[in-house]
Image: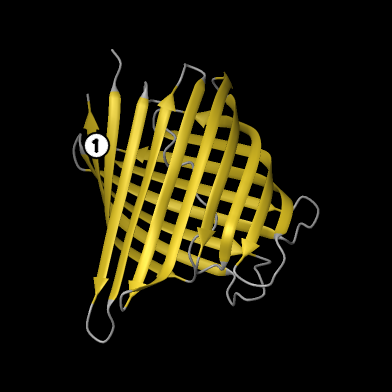
Amino acid sequence: MKKTVIKLSIFFLTISLGYSQGVINSEKLFNSEVEKFYFILSPAIDIQSGNSEVFETGLQFSSLYKITERNWLKGTAGVDIISEEGEDVSNDKFLQLRHTFSIKKWIHTFTFYQLQNSFSLGVKKRELLGSGLRLKLLKKEDVALDIGVGIMIESEEYNSDIPIAEKNRITSMMIFKRNINSIELKNTTYYQPHIINIWDFRLLNELDLTFSINDWLDYEVNYIIRYDNEQPSFLDKKLDQYITSGFNIKFTK
């Protein structure tokens, strides 16, 4: 029997230290156990009043569609808008499309395109196009370990006089997952060095802790670290940190 899974994630707490995230974790949604379709919607609202009037709203959605037993198609998009005293001070958007083809149960290819902008990072437009291989090193009922490596083309246009930066990068990843009763621990790491200059690299690590309350409700806490070793000259910090938490409401039929 085919099953459709729709997952609604309502995040109610976000703490950001530094700048907006530049490297996107596209592994959060991948779930090979889904038979046909998977969907996540994550809205967020933050309101501050008093000495300053600040309104922040964000929306992110991801969908995973199983075309055949070997072919997967995934789309992820989001927007985050911050308004102060009625004027927009930040408007960040991103979009990623990804195709996955399973060669064997333990190895598959991935191809992706990503488009985004980031006000706080000074990025007017960032485009990525890449592909690679992902291997399952360990797959058991309660623990899993995957690694992946590929090549991507990166183009960044800044909100400044800095010329458009076009680079070829290696993109590598490691995904570890551990289930303990009703708790899931998942850690995803991305390392993206320049193909020639190894000191020009970006690093993202995301630690997710998910508590299963019942069949249709989860609570999730995320801790994210982003590091850019050669950030643009107009940015002061190389390290960004984020903490998010919220509920996941799942619908199945």
Circle 1 sits in a helix, a strand or a loop, which is it? Answer: strand
> What colouring style does the render use?
secondary structure
Residue at far right of view: 196
Q: Nearer the viewer, residue 36 or 160?
A: 160
Is 160 positioned to the left or the right of 184 in the image? right
Q: Residues within 10 Å of mark 1 (few under 14, many from 20)?
A: some
Residue at the spot of label 1? 250
Q: Position of residue 109 (x, y in %)?
A: 61, 28
Q: Which residue: 63% across, 72% down? A: 160
Q: Amino acid at mark 1?
A: Lys
| Depth order, front residue of 104/35 | 35
- Image quadrant occupied by the C terminus: top left
Q: Is residue 78 above or below residue 119?
A: above
Q: Residue at horizontal 50%, vertical 69%?
A: 120
Q: Position of residue 50 (x, y in %)?
A: 22, 84
Instruction: Determine the residue positioned at 45% across, 60% down.
Output: 92
Quarter of the image for the N terminus: give it.
top left
